[in-house]
Image: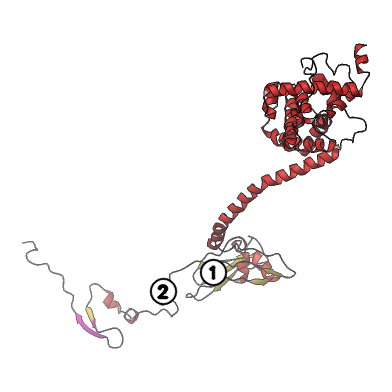
Amino acid sequence: MDSVKPDKTLAGRLDGLELPGAPPFREEAVWNGIARHLRARRLRALWPRMAVAALLLLLAAPLLLLRTEVSPPPQARVTPETKDRISTGAAPAVEPTTKTMSREEATVATKTRVTQPAPGKVVVAPALPGDSSVAIVQVMVPADTVPAPPAAAIAATPAVAVTAPVRRFRIAHINDRGTPVLPEIAATPVPDEDRDPQGVLRLRRGASGPQTETEGPHERRPRRFSLSLSPQ
Amino acid sequence: MELAQLIEDCRHERRSAQKALYGHFARPFFGLCRRYLKNESEAEEVLQNGFVNIFAALPRFEYISEAATVGWMKRVLVNECLQHLRRSTSFLQVGLEEAAEVPGGEDPLEGLEAAELLRTILQLPTGYRTVFNLYVLEQYSHKEIAALLGISEGTSKSQLSKARALLQQLITQAYPGHGLRKTR
């Protein structure tokens, strides 16, 4: 037994040896088998990751849906220009409806700027200073109405295309829709002599209107202080 | 490409590097498997499983040197061969048979061509061949062989002795002029 010793070089000689007459080593076929195993192993390793991802997606789906419901309406968009029409996706604050305007209107809109310097007064002026193609026009409108800007002004406002409509509110008066009326008592003319602080007094009785009676005149008397307070 | 770089690329599961590593070691490792197994198809099957195991274990493998890496890959393949033999019913059945005791003498492998030697080793019964391969060619100790095969150290030594005797007998039968060549 002692004569059989470990032989490292012999192993090296034998390992690279092919016996004559033996079936040849099918190197490529073995590699195909290895590659197939490695692919299957990689897929098996992917399954748990995909399962975790699907689980997370399922958990996150209700949150995403909830977020979609709560979120504000989608941003206004300008649709691509068609042959001869331009549509605006959203309207300005004063008129939250979708408007469609012709090319001419859109051209006017881009050239003009509409301002309202005072209630009841609307001024249409060129958007660019020194633009002679647009005349400055001042329009008077009834004081108790809020004029809606023309469609041209809608398109001329940059916010139309990029901002969501903002609702603006104003405090309305009960008499907004009616004609302003002065109280009769305030409308009655006052004689000049009555305006004199040194003149006679005319007292009026009754409510305002035709039933008003005037009493007087009475002499104005200087105000007297009581004795206790007057100096001796 | 250097082995270290190949191993590093294989750790990242690059298919081209895996194929290059396989191409470099496929033939010698096939020879190793062939020494343990009965035929070529079994050797190919074990070689395929062994390489799959090597590629699977490479991400955890730490490269130290080329010799250590080759040694590690050989151990993986030898273990794969032994597992295959354990699964087969013939493993160690013949090894338990009594073989004629041959008195210790000269090395029967001395002066034999590699091809002749390989052909003779392949004629050995599975149990003898396994212990012979592990001890003589893989240089495992009897203690390691006993642990690997689940036998005692004494059994491992006895199996090696019987393998040597049978090998000498087979060589004498197959190559009658072997004794003459050796004495020349």
Residue at horizontal 93%, vertical 33%?
A: A21
- The single residue placed furthest to the top in the displayed view is B184
Q: Position of residue B149 (x, y in %)?
A: 70, 29
Residue located beneath label 2 in the image: A173
Location of residue A154 (image quadrant): bottom right
Residue that lies at the very extreme toward the bottom in this rendered image: A210
Q: Quadrant of the N terminus of chain A?
A: top right
For marks 2 and 1, give the one nearer the viewer.
1
Q: Chain of mark 2?
A: A
For the residues labelled 2 and 1, the Cα–Cα distance comes to 19 Å
For image coordinates 25% across by 84% down, the residue present is A206
| Residue B170 image point, x, y percent | 87, 24
Q: Residues within 10 Å of mark 2 (few under 14, many from 20)?
A: few
Question: Which residue matches tag 1?
Answer: A94
Tell me the element at label 1. loop
Please say if the residues under marks 2 and 1 sit with CB atoms less than 8 Å apart: no
Whole-percent x, y for residue B18 in the image? 77, 36
What's the chain of the residue with tag 1?
A
Segment colored magenta: A204-218
Query: Which element carries disc 2, helix, strand or loop?
Result: loop
* Quadrant placement of the C terminus of chain A: bottom left
Identity, as a three-letter code, of the amino acid under mark 1: Val
Judge whether residue B13 can be spotted in this image: no
Task: Determine the residue positioned at 83% across, 23% down.
Answer: B167
Q: Position of residue A45 (x, y in %)?
A: 67, 44
Q: Image check: B126 left or right of A156?
A: right
